[in-house]
Amino acid sequence: MSEKARKLFEALDLDRNGMLTREEVITALRTKGPDLAAAGDLPFWGVGDADASSALFDAADQNGDAVLTLEEFATVVDRRFGWR
């Protein structure tokens, strides 16, 4: 798992409970995405609309429990963003 994936997960975990919900991902990418991209913590093309954020969530939710663990999230974003 890359450090970038861990840092992005922490930035998106709005309630700091160690898991991401679909709403959290959508809200956090909409509100924090541009700043994260400007800081180099997220590719600019990774900042999308609600549908793109929801699709990222679906791709990462490997066990279908409607929450993402750091491991599930990192597996997808490391591959998708070329961080690993």
Image (cartoon, rainbow, N blue to C red):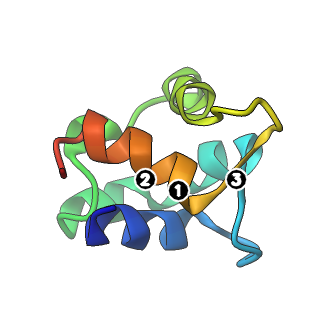
Give, as a three-letter code, the residue at label 1: Glu
The quarter of the picture where residue 22 lies is top right
> Mark 3 packing: few (<14 Cα in 10 Å), some, or many (20+)?
some
The residue beneath circle 2 is 74
As displayed, is residue 37 above or below residue 62? below
Quarter of the image containing the N terminus? bottom left
At x 20%, y 62%, the residue is 38
- Dot 3 and dot 2 residues touching (CB under 8 Å): no
The circle drawn on residue 13 is: none
The quarter of the picture where residue 23 lies is top right
Foreground disc of the pair 3, 2: 2
Residue 84 picture location, percent across and down: 18, 50
Foreground disc of the pair 1, 3: 1
The residue beneath circle 1 is 71
At x 61%, y 48%, the residue is 25
Give, as a three-letter code, the residue at label 2: Ala
- Dot 2 and dot 1 residues touching (CB under 8 Å): yes
Q: Nearer the viewer, residue 15 or 38?
A: 15
As displayed, is residue 55 above or below residue 48? above
Q: Left or right: where does residue 52 sit relative to residue 28?
A: left
Give, as a three-letter code, the residue at label 3: Glu
The residue beneath circle 3 is 24
The quarter of the picture where residue 7 lies is bottom left
Residue 80 picture location, percent across and down: 28, 34
